[in-house]
Amino acid sequence: MTWNCGLITTDILQLADSARDYINPAIDRYWFEGGYPESWLRDTGRFREVWNEQYLKTYVERDIARQFPNLNAVRFRRFVELLAGCSGSIINYSNIAKILDVSQPTMKDYFRIAHGTFLWRTLPAYSKNTVKRVSKHPRGYFRDTGLLHHILQIPSHKRLLAHPQMGFSWEGMVIEELLRTLNAAGIQYVAYYYRTSGGAEVDLVIEGKFGLIPFEIKHTQNVHSRHFRALRDFVNEFDCPYGIIINNDKKTDYMMKS
C-alpha cells in the first residue's frame, strides 16, 4: 500500500506525492473489510458478517479457552466488544475494569492477551527526555479494521465515513500497515504515541537506529497548518530528522514552516 506523505524538517514541510495520484478504491475496501482473505473471497455483506462473527466466536470460545482455561469466556467476549469502542483512545485500565467488574490486574491481563494474540496493538506513551507533562497511559488499536467495523455494527463504507470512530479506524489501519511493513523488512523499531497534558498529540512515534520519527495521520485530503503544529513542535523538541504526515492528498504541496 502506498500513501501520500509529508516530510517536516526544522525549515520546511514538503508534502511529497506517492506512487499514485488518486485514492485507490481497493484501499477503501481494504480499510472497510479488513485484511482477512476470507472476506474477500465472497464479496457479499452477509458472508462477511457471518464470517466475522464466527471468527470472534472461535477466537474466544476455542483459541482463548484452550490457551487460558481459567479465563471467563463470557466476560472476555464482553471485553473484546469494549475494545472496539476504545480503539484509538488512551486506555484507562481502572475505568474499563469497573465496567467489567474485574480487578485492574485482571484487566491488564486481558489487554496482554489481546495484544499477544494479534487482536489488539498496544502503543505505550513516549515520555523520554521531555520537559513537558505528558500522558503515560497506553493507547491502542484493533489490528483488523474489518473485525472492528463488524463489532461496531457499521454496515457499509458510506456509513463508516459518517461514524464517530472513522478517524480512529483510519489511523489504526495506517499504523498497522506501517508497522507490518517495517516488520517485513526486518527493521528493528519501537512504536509509541505522544500526548502532552495540554492536548498536543502525535499519532505515532517510531524509534530505531534510523532515529526518532513522528507521524501524523489524517483521512482528509487537505492539510492545514493546525494539523502539523504538534508534529512540528515534537520535531523541534526532540531534534528529529523530519516528521511525516500521511493523508489522502492528490497533489504535491509545499508549505513553509511559520
Image (cartoon, helix red, strand yellow):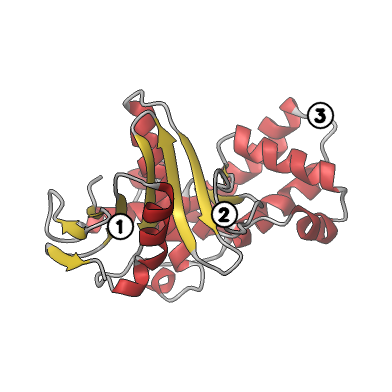
Tell me the amino acid under the disc marked 3.
Pro
* Left or right for 113, reference 117: right
SS class, disc 3: loop
Up the image or down, 201 lies above or below 123; here it is below
Frontmost residue, 41 versus 79: 79
* Mark pair 3, 2: CA separation: 45 Å
> Which disc number belongs to residue 155?
none
Q: Work out whether 170 lies above or below 126.
A: below
**Image-based side of 70 in relation to 1, left or right:** right
How far apart are the alpha carbons under marks 1 and 3?
44 Å
Residue 11, horizontal then vertical, whole percent: 22, 58
* Residue 160 position (above or below residue 146): below
* Mark 2 lies on residue: 131
Assign the N terminus to one quadrant of the image. top left
Residue type, numbered disc 1? Ile
Sequence-earlier tag: 2 or 1: 2
The tag earlier along the polypeptide, 3 or 2, is: 3
The residue lying at 72 percent from left, 51 percent from top is: 79
Q: Which percent across, then down, holds residue 185?
A: 31, 26
Q: Dot 3 corresponds to which residue?
A: 69
Disc sitting over residue 245 in the figure: 1
